[in-house]
Amino acid sequence: MKLQKFIITTLLSVSIIGTGIPANVSASSYAVTKHTYTLKINKKKQKKKAVGASYNGKSIKTKAPGYMTGNTQMLSAYYVFKKGMGVSYSYSKKTWKVTLKRGSKKIVMKRGSKYAYVNGKKTKMPTPARMVYSYNQKKDAIYVPGSFCAKHLGLSYSWNSSSYTEAFKSSTSSKAPANQNTSAATTTTTGKTSYVQLAKPSGLSSSNISSTDDYHNYRLILNIKGNYKSFYEKSSNHKVVNDSSFKSYSVSYSGGYTKIYIKPRSKTIKGFRVTQTNSYIRVYYASPKSMYKQIIVLDAGHGGKDTGATNKSYVEKNMTLNIVKAAKKYFDKDPSIKVYYTRLSDTYPSLADRSALANNVGADRFYSVHINSAGSSATGTETLYNSKGYKSTSGLTSYKWSSTIHPYIRSATGFKNRGLVDRTGLYVLRHTKTASTLTEIGFISNNKEAKSMKANYSKYGKAVYNSTKASLNKNPAKR
């Protein structure tokens, strides 16, 4: 009988684990936010600082500690969403499908897949749902990306980096503008953080509002479809909160769009975060380092009056710009990285301007793209670093940063591997106060390589993105 009882108990435990719903063991303690727990994630044993959660101002107790992966907070679907917020939840151990439903909103995702179906529409997530094992609880649990689920279940959401807590609310539905440069990779802005609050006229849909981080002009531009110029010019419909030194606010209308220009300071770059409810829009701002978790400055070499190297119709300034623009398409889809570009058109920022941009925004990495030139027989890809340069916030050196990105670029070009080259005298590698690298894609002076480079901008842009992502995953920024 004892053996039979043991087998039944064991099978019951396996059944509970298989559903992704932890067994109700009263002796198990609740996870403590910011405490370190050992978890098995994607078959790897890792130590993670616990992420907490609250709903309508009340802390949610969970026996499955939340954790960060990259810049995404992962939470227990059972404890946080079902028990903590009353969301309907189910998990199929046969199909691995996770289903969350709140009112008319339904999310169906599959463990390990980056794509979910939101009310039947295929939508990309920042990271897949996971089955995670807790060594402290000795149990598995299904984890889902918190902010993604909140957004698509009609919950407002914010992240407080100081308390390491995700806050959810049911009273209003917040939707951030679809613009990576202003809404992505942000930390929470709470307390006395400065912001501009704008009234929201009845009938104005969140989908008709986007934003542009015009950081070269030290401002944010809200783009609102329709003519709301007179509405937003009225002082009663906008206010600046917690900022007695606010620089300027102005409104214009053209091409079917109302443009609202928000400039907190003169010649000071600010990070922005835009949130919306049914009644107002809030534009939070602060130093980029306090707003964004990971910051990259991407530099297209030369530009404007400085053509760089040339060979017949091949011009270095155009080629570097095309590679950076190709990379931007990938960065724009990644909400975990804030990217500042030294140029996105045929302009000429000085070398001092390029380094200053990285220094002013507190960049975690500086990445400069160039094309080499020598004799017609010269060939190959090389990456330059400064052995005497600065380190990133995580302690990453210029050499380690360069050694991570070089294999990606060399693999994309297929050119001869010229390896890493120590260049302590280059201005941008010497004056940029973070881990810096300068990659020479290939030789413009070599007709065969020049032709190949011109035909593969997208491929090289993807390599720039992938190499940056790999480095940030290996050595994440520290704030």
Image: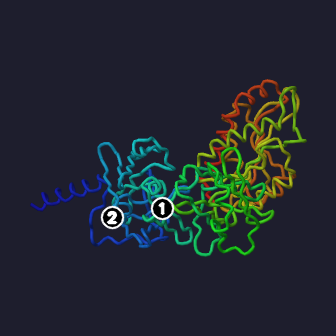
Distance from disc 2 to disc 1, alpha carbons, whole Å, reads 18 Å
Q: Is residue 130 visible?
A: yes
In the depicted structure, whether residue 297 falls above or below residue 291 = above
Q: How far across and down, in percent of the image, does residue 74 sit?
A: 46, 58
Q: Which mark is residue 198?
A: none
479, 252: nearer the viewer: 252
Q: Which comes before the other along the chain, label 2 or label 1?
A: 2
Q: Is mark 2 on a helix, strand or loop?
A: helix
Determine contact: label 2, label 1, CB under 8 Å.
no
Residue name at image x 37 percent, y 55 percent: 142
Q: Residue 83 carries which label?
A: 2
Q: What element carries label 1?
A: strand
How is the model colour-coded? Answer: rainbow
Residue name at image x 81 percent, y 58 percent: 356
Tell me the mark number nearer the camera, choosing from 2 and 1. 1
Q: Can residue 478 be seen in this view?
A: no
Q: How far across and down, in percent of the image, does residue 348 sit?
A: 86, 46
**Mark 2 neighbour class, 10 Å CA radius: few under 14, some 14 to 19, many 20 or more:** some
In the depicted structure, whether residue 368 falls above or below residue 12 = above
236, 300: nearer the viewer: 236
In the depicted structure, whether residue 283 falls above or below residue 33 = above
Residue corresponding to mark 1:
156
Tell me the quarter of the picture where residue 231 sits. bottom right
Q: How far across and down, in percent of the image, does residue 161 sit?
A: 56, 68
Query: Looking at the rendering, in which quadrant would you find the C terminus?
Result: bottom right
Query: Looking at the rendering, in which quadrant would you find the N terminus?
Result: bottom left
